[in-house]
Image: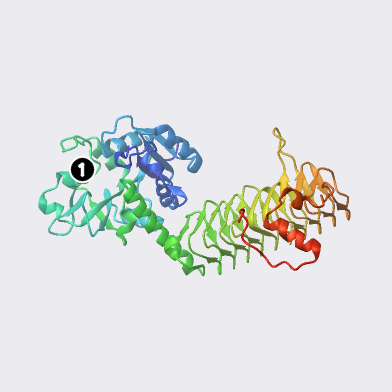
Amino acid sequence: MSQPHLRTVVVLAAGEGKRMKSSLPKVLHPLLGRTLLGHVLTAAGPLGADRTVVVVGHGADQVREHLSEVAPGATPVLQERQLGTGHAVRMALDAVPDASGTVVVINGDVPLLRPETVQALVEAHEDAAAAATVLAAEVPDPTGLGRIVRDVQGQLEQIIEERDATPQQRALREINAGIYAFDAARLREALGKLSTDNDQGEEYLTDVFALLRDAGEPVAVHCAADYVETLGCNDRVELAALRRLLRDRVNEGWMRTGVSILDPHTTWIDVTVTVERDAVIDQNTQLQGATTVGAGALVGPDTTLIDTVVGAGASIVRSHALGAEVGPQASVGPYAYLRPESRLGRKAKVGTFVETKKASIGDGSKVPHLSYVGDATIGEYSNIGAATVFVNYDGVRKHHTTIGSHARTGADNMFVAPVRVGDGAYTAAGSVITGDVPPGAMAVARGQQRNVEGWVLRKRAGTDAAEAARRAGEGEPDVGGAASEGD
């Protein structure tokens, strides 16, 4: 016989979220690196629950797929008809009949909830041996939220939805945060007694508190230290407000660890990002996904990094990087684009208007400007001339180019892959390199220059250019002239 589960987490994620006006289920809307649901699951994680159940409904397949990625151990339970929060929790417990001990119920749309607050709620509930404990908060504006109603002794009397509240109850500012801890056995018994005698015709989970209190069971209120943690999300305006609040929290946290954020209001850092001490994040910068920024690095202004590793002391200015790796003391930008699998070694440089993809650029090597480097390996301390293109695609397959160490390639080169340029080799400006270049060789691959003497005097007679050419031919000084029609 299996051991009873002492803690079970139930996340309510079945709602449609009509006011979001979206084909995406509300709980899957993203917020600085995680979905709303992902934030809630993270907040509950430190509880060490024996089992996590997520009640799904609208967009159930999408939510299940997301759970398989972020919380594969969670059990999704389908609520086909949304008949209220009480009904949802009853279905969740039916799916885990051996659950006992403490059941923690959390709405799936409270992304600012901290793990410490959930832990404090559960500890207070268990220490008091309560049958049920609700997380409450004092808010400036309680409009639209359920209210906590206390008796003359200050004990919980009932939790009432705003639509069912009297004017006097609506004036209360202590609200129900939609987060609860229950004794499993007493919760199961109370759920079986819920009615639908209310304005919505639904089974309210909050009615469990009144049932337990009437039965003489101890019920309690635990107040959150910061009401902001309890804020939910019903539409995109509220989602944007939550995003700003979370941005401020994340930025403040990094600044207190020794990171300089020059303009916190225009800096957006996902909760999944890591930034080391003495890094400097300039304005209008977004750090997303699994990005890490090393100690003393400079990122920004006007930069977006997604799943990118930035080494200590590196610099990235006005650039975009996705799935790239920038080595220590390397420099990128301005106006560079590092596509996936771009890797820069120590002190390497990718400069202005350069795009890279599946490119390994060795220590100290430079691609300073106006170039595309794709499917390529560049050795150490080589220099790639301006306006260079690594021609990697033949219309069917991608091919690789290798540039050796200490090589120097001329401006306006094209390397038609597959091709290799050896260590210490040079290539002449304007060359189209279609064959391998041996180490130490100079490759010249361009048409021979031919000058057609007198062409301007014959073909462009009467122009400023023709007059300048005539004077030069006769040894007269160039005194300038009127602007030509091409100016």
Q: Nearer the viewer, residue 210 or 318?
A: 318
Q: Quadrant of residue 195?
A: top left
Q: Is residue 169 visible?
A: yes
Task: Please report the residue visible at 31 percent of the width from the left and 36 percent of the height from the top.
Answer: 88
Question: Looking at the image, can residue 1 be seen?
Answer: no
Q: Nearer the viewer, residue 290 or 371?
A: 371
Spot occupied by residue 289 in the image (x, y as percentages of width and height):
52, 51
Answer with left or right where residue 98 lies relative to residue 269: left
Q: Residue at x 78, y 41 (%)?
A: 418
- Rendered image quadrant of residue 173: bottom left
Quadrant location of residue 23?
top left
Q: Is residue 266 above or below residue 20?
A: below
Q: Amino acid at mark 1?
A: Asp
Horizontal placement of 48 versus 465: left or right?
A: left
Number of labels in the image equals: 1
Locate the N terminus and report the quarter of the image it occupies: top left
Which colour assignment does the render follow?
rainbow
Rendered location of residue 313, percent (x, y): 63, 66
Left or right: where 3 falls relative to 186: right
Q: List x then y, in percent, for residue 477.
A: 75, 68
Q: Residues within 10 Å of mark 1 (few under 14, many from 20)?
A: some
The C terminus is located in which quarter? bottom right
Identity of the residue drawn at 40% across and 61% down: 248
The residue that mark 1 highlights is 207
Residue 485 lies, in percent from the top left, at 61, 54
Which secondary structure, mark 1? Answer: helix
